[in-house]
Amino acid sequence: MMNQHVSGIFILCGLWLIIIGLLGYYSPKKYSRVFLLFVLIAHSFGASSWLSMLYGFWTAIIYILFNAILFYKIEDLVTQDTI
């Protein structure tokens, strides 16, 4: 049954990314750093194990790079607002 309703997982992933961004942005600086670093590590590990199995090593590396850049961009936004 799930093979016919795959688009739902993409909607959930999109909502999850929005929630992560909002929590990272509106949390106190001390907590947002830990939260965003945890999310970076957890998502990089989970997705890279799946990506490397299906699409190869370099796809997983590009995904980890994207996550790291996103982490630092959000970190910059959070620290910029508090200064």
Image (tube, rainbow, N blue to C red):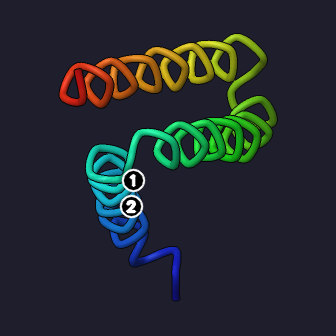
Seen at 75% across and 21% down, the residue is 56
Name the kind of residue labelled 1 in the image: Ile
Alpha carbon of mark 2 to alpha carbon of mark 1: how far? 6 Å
Name the kind of residue labelled 2 in the image: Trp
Q: Is residue 15 placed above or below 41 in the rendered structure? A: below
User: Who is closer to the viewer here, 47 or 78?
Assistant: 78
Mark 2 lies on residue: 16
- Near mark 2 (Cα within 10 A), the count class, few <14, some 14-19 or many ≥20, is few
- Disc nearest the viewer among 2 and 1: 1
Report helix, strand or loop for mark 1.
helix
User: Who is closer to the viewer here, 42 or 82?
Assistant: 82
- Residues at circles 2 and 1 in contact by the CB criterion of under 8 Å: yes
Seen at 70% across and 11% down, the residue is 58
Mark 1 lies on residue: 20
Quarter holding residue 44: top right
Q: In the displayed orientation, state which residue is furthest to the front.
A: 83
Seen at 45% across and 15% down, the residue is 69
Residue 72 is situated, as x and y percent measured from the top left of the image, at: 44, 18
Residue 53 is situated, as x and y percent measured from the top left of the image, at: 81, 36
Q: Is residue 26 placed above or below 53 in the rendered structure? A: below
- Near mark 1 (Cα within 10 A), the count class, few <14, some 14-19 or many ≥20, is some
